[in-house]
Amino acid sequence: HATQKLSPLPDGGVRLTMVVGDITEVTSWVLSYGETAQAIEPPELVETVRKELAGALARYGKAASSSASSTSSRAKGRG
């Protein structure tokens, strides 16, 4: 991305800063890194990531009570 800047962090990680017009793709990108990434700003991105993770956690909380011997997955479309 033309505006991206990487800054090293003391813990060995990096901070990525860039200007985007829409946070949709950035949200998916942050979520793809799982627990190793954290959205810092803008607040809309942080809240969107938080809501996505809360929804996923709620689904997995429900799945924890199902049989451990059964493995399956499903995707819910957005629309």
Image: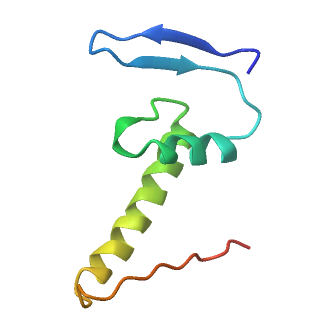
Vertical comparison of 1 with 6: above or below? below
Residue 42, located in which quarter of the rendered image? Answer: top right
- Residue 16 location, x and y as percent? 53, 20
Vertical comparison of 42 with 27: above or below? above
Vertical comparison of 69 with 54: above or below? below
Position of residue 8 in the picture relative to residue 67 (left or right): right
Q: Residue at x 59, y 48 (%)?
A: 28
Q: Nearer the viewer, residue 55 or 72?
A: 72
Position of residue 21 in the picture relative to residue 25 (left or right): right
Numbered marks: total: 0
Q: Residue at x 62, y 39 (%)?
A: 26
Q: Nearer the viewer, residue 50 or 16?
A: 16
- Residue 38 location, x and y as percent? 41, 35
- Residue 49 location, x and y as percent? 49, 49
Position of residue 27 in the picture relative to residue 78 (left or right): left
Q: Quadrant of the N terminus?
A: top right
Q: Residue at x 51, y 40 (%)?
A: 30
Q: Quadrant of the C terminus?
A: bottom right
Vertical comparison of 72 with 58: above or below? below
Q: Residue at x 47, y 78 (%)?
A: 73
The type of colouring in the image is: rainbow
